[in-house]
């Protein structure tokens, strides 16, 4: 459409579309679905730094533009007498380069009186009293004549016209800086080239009755843009694979073999490391016994036997935890969390094991638990009252003393209180046969559901030799053990602060661990994520790295360092506006954890 076009007087009616679906209800669920979908489309975009366009801007628009349906529906509310009454709106955020290909669709709800509508892109600061494409750094495809406009009031023939019911898509290829359009799912070809960075999705209207809805990815697109992305990803991968390695890296295969060997040694894959060494002529940097020792400790941590792992570490590496007090504190906090998960069973697990007649074996509010009516074996739910005597939630404050009083009501009427007390010296545990350990996520146990040794009343305490006999003496031993470990953990926190100073990380660990006691069902609480077996993995990795460093081996395998560098490089490429970074999938090309 040319700038000189004039409007007539006919109006049109709107209809239901994507915007109405977003506004219809289920906002929280829809928000989650939208986030997941956009993350799938644009996995390398860090929205903390470069948010994706999700809606039209309520500020960056001309006054003749009205927004409804969560700022996804645009309608014209001006006079529509001439090109001076044109009005546009930009999205709230520019298109991040890390998208690789960015795409959005606009459904024409009503073409209005004349259908003088434009869909496209524009830079920040472009006049919004114009249709897209009329000004510099503005690009548009117009519905009344099918012309494309590139920084000029004179358009060029491009595609078909569009009207009510049509869905027009606009995509920008950030690899080669080109723009394309689609109509009702059909690709119309390249419309613009040599586009500048940081453009915004833009739509413009000019006559009364014009209404359009935008889909920024909150719903599936009519056009299969994901197939385009798949093709570009394959081309990028082929380009990387065909890259000619310079002569200065003639021995790159040997370097890679060393990196692989260090990775196997780091994670304790004994038999694999030995086989790889024989095949590739590599030398295993750590002796087999040492690798098996680390393997054994890793297995204990991953199975939730934290106290045994601590005891074994002190036997094999006597000074390690003394030199790494933060690591010791992490282990103790994890041990406390494991005890909570053991002594306060998940409701679904109780029902399965005990064949409960009632759906809720443990009832109560945030103040405590009540006993199940049918006294199921293995359920250690007791009436517990949590009182924060220092005025800080979770028993943590800025002072050295973090008094946290926990009252337990049992048949013997005994009350226990968490208060600073010097911890006992943990005793060692019997050694177990070593075997190769897979430290990858979701390691299964012997029975596939519950960690070994965490069934019914069999628990693992911070001091096994003293407490395992107590664990079978009465039905309340699990909670009593939990309280004792809590006292020792609090005492350790106070001591560490006095000796080493304040640590925000340690304070957070303690707060999170103690917060589990404030809920009748800690598994379903806001801090219940701690009870997941996956949360053992960071503890396992930290302990393993510390052991390796103590025997003069790298804390992090070079292969992991190289992968981290590659991720960082992709982030830098995205920040520099190089869209090709979006199609380098490091997680698929190298599954290194």
Image: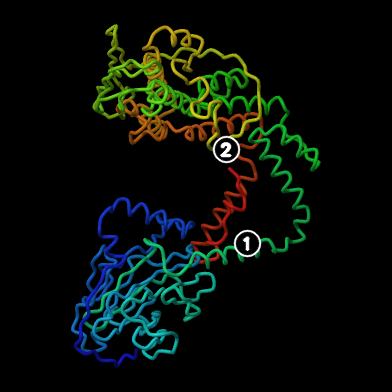
Q: Is residue 473 left or right of residue 399?
A: right
Disc 1 is placed on an element classified as: helix
Asked if disc 1 and disc 2 are in contact, CB closer than 8 Å, the reply is no
| Mark 1 vs 2, N-terminal side | 1
235 up-or-down from 564: above or below: below
Quarter of the figure with the N terminus? bottom left
- On the picture, is 559 further left or further right than 536? right
The one nearer the camera, 150 or 342, is: 342
Instruction: State the SS at label 2.
Output: loop
Q: Left or right of 231: which side holds 34?
A: left
Residue sitting at x 65%, y 20%:
433
Of 408 and 253, the residue lying toward us? 408
Residue 478 percent across, percent down from the top left: 40, 15
Is residue 495 visible in this depiction of the protein? no
Front residue (pair 445, 82):
445
Q: Position of residue 61 (x, y in %)?
A: 27, 73
Q: Position of residue 487 (x, y in %)?
A: 37, 17
Q: Total label count?
A: 2
Q: Where does the image place residue 533, in percent across and percent down from the top left? A: 48, 32
Residue at 76%, 58% in the rendered image = 248
Q: Which residue is mark 2?
A: 440
Spot the residue most to the bottom: 4
Q: Which mark is residue 237?
A: 1
Quarter of the picture containing the C terminus is top right
How packed is label 2: few (under 14 Cα within 10 Å), some, or many (20 or more)?
Answer: few
Distance of label 1 from label 2 (alpha carbons):
26 Å
Classed neighbour count for the residue bearing mark 1: other residues with Cα under 10 Å, few (<14), some (14–19), many (≥20): some
Choose top left, top right, bottom left or bottom right for residue 410.
top left
């Amino acid at each position: 459409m040319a700038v000189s076009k004039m409007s007539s007087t006919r109006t049109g009616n709107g209809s239901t579309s994507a915007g109405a679906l977003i506004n219809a209800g289920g906002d929280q669920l829809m928000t989650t679905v939208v986030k997941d979908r956009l993350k799938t489309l644009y996995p390398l975009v860090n929205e903390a730094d470069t948010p994706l366009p999700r809606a039209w801007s309520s500020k960056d628009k001309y006054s003749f533009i009205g927004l409804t349906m969560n700022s996804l529906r645009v309608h014209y509310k001006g006079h529509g007498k001439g090109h001076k009454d044109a009005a546009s709106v930009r999205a709230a955020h520019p298109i991040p380069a890390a998208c690789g290909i960015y795409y959005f669709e606009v459904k024409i709800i009503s073409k209005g009186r004349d259908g003088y509508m434009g869909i496209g892109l524009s830079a920040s600061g472009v006049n919004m009293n114009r249709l897209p494409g009329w000004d510099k750094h503005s690009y548009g495809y117009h519905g009344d004549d099918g012309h494309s406009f590139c920084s000029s009031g004179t358009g060029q023939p491009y595609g078909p016209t569009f009207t009510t019911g049509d869905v027009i898509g606009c995509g920008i290829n950030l690899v080669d800086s080109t723009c394309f359009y689609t109509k009702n799912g059909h690709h119309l070809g390249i419309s613009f080239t040599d586009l500048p960075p940081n453009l915004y999705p833009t739509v413009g209207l000019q006559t009364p009755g014009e209404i359009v809805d935008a889909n920024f990815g909150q719903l599936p697109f009519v056009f299969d843009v994901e197939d385009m992305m798949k093709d570009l990803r394959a081309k990028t991968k082929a380009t990387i694979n065909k890259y000619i390695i310079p002569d200065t890296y003639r021995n790159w295969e040997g370097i890679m073999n060393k990196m692989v060997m260090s990775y196997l040694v780091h994670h304790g894959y004994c038999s694999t490391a030995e086989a790889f060494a024989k095949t590739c002529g590599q030398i295993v940097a750590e002796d087999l016994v040492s690798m098996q020792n680390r393997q054994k400790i890793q297995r204990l941590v991953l199975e939730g036997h934290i106290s045994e792992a601590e005891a074994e570490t002190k036997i094999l590496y006597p000074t390690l935890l003394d030199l790494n007090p933060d690591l010791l504190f992490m282990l103790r906090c994890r041990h406390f969390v494991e005890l909570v998960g053991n002594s306060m069973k998940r409701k679904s697990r109780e029902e399965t094991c005990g064949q409960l007649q009632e759906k809720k074996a443990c009832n109560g509010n945030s103040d405590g638990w009540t006993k199940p009516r049918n006294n199921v074996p293995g359920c250690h739910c007791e009436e517990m009252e949590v009182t924060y005597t220092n005025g800080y939630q979770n028993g943590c404050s800025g002072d050295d003393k973090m008094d946290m009083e926990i009252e337990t009501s049992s048949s013997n009427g005994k009350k226990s209180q968490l208060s600073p007390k010097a911890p006992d010296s943990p005793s060692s545990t019997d050694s177990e046969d070593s075997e190769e350990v897979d430290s990858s996520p979701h390691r299964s146990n012997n029975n596939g559901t519950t960690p070994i040794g965490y069934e019914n009343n069999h628990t693992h305490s911070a001091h096994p030799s003293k407490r395992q006999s107590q664990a079978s003496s009465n039905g309340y031993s699990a909670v009593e053990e939990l309280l004792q470990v809590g006292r020792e953990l609090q005492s350790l926190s106070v001591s560490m602060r006095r000796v080493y100073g304040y640590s925000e990380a340690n304070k957070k660990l303690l707060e999170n661990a103690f917060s589990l006691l404030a809920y009748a069902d800690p598994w379903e609480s806001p801090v219940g994520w701690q009870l997941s077996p996956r949360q053992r993995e960071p503890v396992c990795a930290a302990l393993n790295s510390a052991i390796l460093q103590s025997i003069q081996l790298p804390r992090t395998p070079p292969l992991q360092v190289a992968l981290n560098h590659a991720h960082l490089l992709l982030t830098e490429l995205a920040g520099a506006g190089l869209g090709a970074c979006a199609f380098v999938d490091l997680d698929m090309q190298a599954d290194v954890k």
